[in-house]
Image: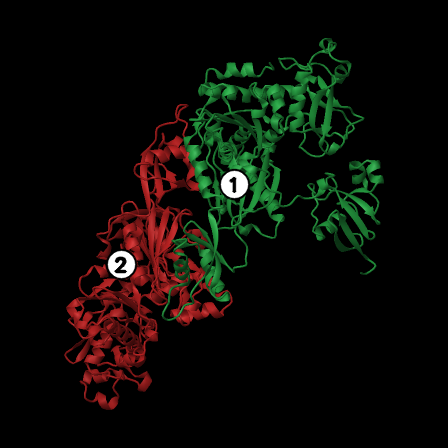
Chain colours: A green, B red
Amino acid sequence: MSPSEFAVTFTPGGETVTVPAGELLLNAAVAAGVPITAPCGGHGRCGKCLVRIERGKADAPDDHEREHLTDDQLSVGWRLACRARVLGDLEVYVAPESEVVCAKPLENDLIEDVAVEAAVRQIVVELPEPSLEDQRSDFIRLRDALAGQFPLRDARLHALWRLPQVLRDNGFRLAATVRDDLLVEVGPVNGHHPLGVAVDIGTTTVVAYLVDLVTGQHLGSGTAHNPQAQHGADVISRTEYSKTTPDGLARLQREAIGVVNQVVAQALECIDAGPECIHEMTVVGNTCMHHLFLGLDPRYIAEAPYIPVNAAPISVAPRDLGVRMNSEGRVFCLPVVAGYVGADTIGVIAATRLTDSPEPVLAVDIGTNGEVALWSGERLVCASCAAGPAFEGAQIEYGMRAAPGAISSVEFVDGDLRIETINGKPALGLCGSGLFDAMAVVLQAGLVDMMGRMVDAEKAKSLSEKLAARLEGEANTRRVVLVSADESGTGDSICFTQKDVRELQLAKGAIRAAVELMLKECGLKADDLSEVLLAGAFGNYLRPESAVRMGLLPPMDVGRIRGVGNAAGAGAMMALLSLPWRQRACDLARHAEHLELARRADFQQMFMETMLFL
Amino acid sequence: MSPSEFAVTFTPGGETVTVPAGELLLNAAVAAGVPITAPCGGHGRCGKCLVRIERGKADAPDDHEREHLTDDQLSVGWRLACRARVLGDLEVYVAPESEVVCAKPLENDLIEDVAVEAAVRQIVVELPEPSLEDQRSDFIRLRDALAGQFPLRDARLHALWRLPQVLRDNGFRLAATVRDDLLVEVGPVNGHHPLGVAVDIGTTTVVAYLVDLVTGQHLGSGTAHNPQAQHGADVISRTEYSKTTPDGLARLQREAIGVVNQVVAQALECIDAGPECIHEMTVVGNTCMHHLFLGLDPRYIAEAPYIPVNAAPISVAPRDLGVRMNSEGRVFCLPVVAGYVGADTIGVIAATRLTDSPEPVLAVDIGTNGEVALWSGERLVCASCAAGPAFEGAQIEYGMRAAPGAISSVEFVDGDLRIETINGKPALGLCGSGLFDAMAVVLQAGLVDMMGRMVDAEKAKSLSEKLAARLEGEANTRRVVLVSADESGTGDSICFTQKDVRELQLAKGAIRAAVELMLKECGLKADDLSEVLLAGAFGNYLRPESAVRMGLLPPMDVGRIRGVGNAAGAGAMMALLSLPWRQRACDLARHAEHLELARRADFQQMFMETMLFL
């Protein structure tokens, strides 16, 4: 090793790499195969690439680091990997939250018992060599060899372009990639398996799950904010944007395609494969996201009688969209049910096997748009409601993602609130579960009345002293201080506000009204439900007690309420892994009844009632 | 009419147009809807745009016109339309050979009784309007309306992009264009019909036939030389070029695609429609042309055991090739039989309904490559032979296309040769029929012996004086003067040469050997053949007597020999118009037996014999 080079060892993994003096730790980590997250692109702005220097010499922290790190942190060696430079042999601890989590499986046991039977298969086959007695063409030779198992009808040009050389370079033994009755690719036997990716396009968040289509193995995932949010947080405002802005629809589509390409690229980073290995993509999303992704005009969804351009399943060539994957691959969009009941709902219904139950089951997918599916035991009824972005944390004043420092739990104990944050870090904001808890607890503690008003100074007198002390501000700016400024990680207090209550009130009121009307439609009561499934990211974190206490769900045995995680994504994954499952999802969409709440005379009345905190 | 404008009337049609003073006649003709051919682009170089001013004033002829036209022609008013300018009211006669022949049908009665049942159909349909009681999406609404007649499974994005507006602009009535179970386009009811084009890619000539896929009406055609000819006249030399020149295969493919786009554009010129109206293309060609068009490597066709990459029928997206047509359209290439028995042969077999005959029939497709198909009544046997380019006129010293001035007939009458040219114009060269006649007649008249040698001065003494006088030169440069220099249209004599005889000898020897071996293979004799069909451009012009006399075909009743024109093109057209016919062509290819002549011990012996003029 020359004197101008140093060894850097990363813990806890122990990966070691030699780098020139002055190299950034971030680059050293990449070289060592320890990918560190750097959402801001390594400019020192986001403060996410936390590492701790355990031993050895680095340069002095810069202004960015002093901004993101406390003196205490700096004193024990915490640094930002994108700013710190190597000045000697180092041992560097990578904080768990800084690591790019590769090959993160879809955390969902819904897909565990799905047998792989994908649209694209790879078959290894050995062909008899040609002779003057057997002059069959290369393709017909292959077709004949596969005839028993996989009757081929045609071939893509790309496969034929490679076929003669692949055959002759490999002694007439090859791996054939087949879709339906089409040969789509050929290669040597030890080449890549065809990959698939399941994409869930949410109004707020876009997620991709990468999978090996031969083994079914989950290889990685990617996630990003939906960049369309800049034109509006909900589907109505995006539809409006597409209608009123010249080139608006094209722009929204470009953004959808762009973010899908981005999350797929993220997922691919986890393995040594390029986008050309991806042969199949399945997509779920609400009807507006589905339309914008496909470039279909959503304007007639927004006005009565709320008609989508296409609700049927559709299979599209990647280049018609600009999706980066094998050019011979296909993008399969699951069907939608109606203008506001999308492919994501179909994904949830399929993934949760809702209609397999002999008894009534309710599934609620909580996102920017709330979608509710009720299986009565005989009928499958779907409805939607504009829950607003509250459940995504978007309009919540101190809202944040579920990351270290987020308040994840609020309890009412001993006359005061007990707060917990993720990883016990100083509080930075409220994530979903903390938000629902806060709502439930302020009701329980009497900080908010049945109309959703935070109690005024007069009424606060009946509260415990500790509780009363948490109330600040007046009327519309009234708020409950959850964590005081001197205890928080931001230097400001973290509050749950009157405005937050109003947002949540609208959201829960809408969903609850939908639930009540659907039960009524099917002649059922809440007690008849054998199970209530909460899908969506929040569904997983929302405590059943809080859901009932805040009135999102009717009063019921909380033991029957179960979070099922990203069931929409799981549905996309199942449609990716298994054609029979895909067919089942398509059948479900055809048989689902849509309940158009807007046209019901009883909706507004119900909504008024369900907005109350009773 | 202002004094600076004049009326120009074109005869014989009588179309009249008003143009500014000084306008070119070529432009006036275009404005009058009388398209005049101008292969050189209106630069006065080709001399093809002949018109005669019958009455009125034009400018004086320029140098270009003086070069192309004789004083006699100029004196009676002949002009080049691309040079002559309007200086007064005019009456202009357009020479028949100058007119662009638009909507020229495929001159082939083979396709007359094919019922239209194309891959792409257009259906006019009226949908119930949506309401809150009927919220079906636009596509499902359309799908349901068509369900009885045309079960749709999916839709192309391009169609869905337009669907909502087309529906709402036309009161939910539209014309749906459907391929198989896919919706490929939507439009107003009075829009374009989907068009199709049948393409015959010959080694020398490429032809396109345009057709309305709804009515089956022939709309136009286009034709051009195959630009690949610059890299070699035959398939062997082009394969060699593709193998040895860097980027050679890509270049040959580009040229093939380019010329196909060119002939299709030519055909489209005849009507008011763009390439996006073309939804289906069928392609025939020999195996090498087929491979080069598709970008498939032809190298393994050229070496034993002569294996094509793909012999099966294949359907390709236009953009995978760069073919200019509707991006949702398909390019269907008919199957090939073997390395040297191509899709053109399948076209001939299908179009001539060869296998419908209860008795043996032989079909010979005469081109640069000779392909022979024999239906024994039970077996369909195909073979090919390298006929060389002689039958395309390429290596014939005075060869030319069948155009005015071409010698089209040579007879032996009253001890001398009697020559006829097309349109009686001064002779410019020999076209196909004239060439075969010349060969037959020089044999008949004793100018050439059985070995193919033109008689020397000594032997010429036994000929008539007039005949003997036609012989010039010695040995390899010996030739028969058909038209003397002072009677020809070129100022030089037009001859049939010793070299021409050698080329024809090789060509007819190869084809005849193939015919003999195939008859032998099937245990047949020439007398057993109920019919012999001569396909290809030459086949139509080759007089049966000449074919037998020169030994191209075995001695037989010439009444059984029949020209069937461009049967390969007719086959492509039938596969375009009718899916059942397409399926029949594919079935024929699967059942055809290929006779590999090269591997037969008896081929060389047979070839030596069939080269003789017996």
Residue position marked by numbered label 2 in the rendering? B350
Q: Residues within 10 Å of mark 2 (few under 14, many from 20)?
A: many
Q: Residue at x 79, y 27 (%)?
A: A487
Q: Quadrant of the N terminus of chain B?
A: top left
Query: Residue B321 occupies which quadrant of the picture?
Result: bottom left
The amino acid sitting under disc 1 is: Asp
Given residues B329 and A12, the one toward you in this image is: A12
Residue type at mark 2 is Ala
Percent of width and height locating residue B189: 33, 36
Residue B227 to residue B220: above or below: below
Quarter placement of the C terminus of chain B? bottom left
Residue B384 picture location, percent across and down: 31, 70
Please tell me which residue lies in front, B192 or A341.
Answer: A341
Farthest residue toward the bottom? B458
The total of numbered circles placed on residues is 2
Location of residue B552 with respect to A40 vertically, above or below: below
**Residue B24 visible within the image:** no
Residue that label 1 marks? A113
- Residue A107 location (% of width, % of height): 60, 38
Query: What residue do we see at 52% from left, 48% from top?
Result: A213
**Secondary element type, mark 2:** helix
Q: Residue at x 60, y 35 (%)?
A: A205
Residue at mark 2: chain: B
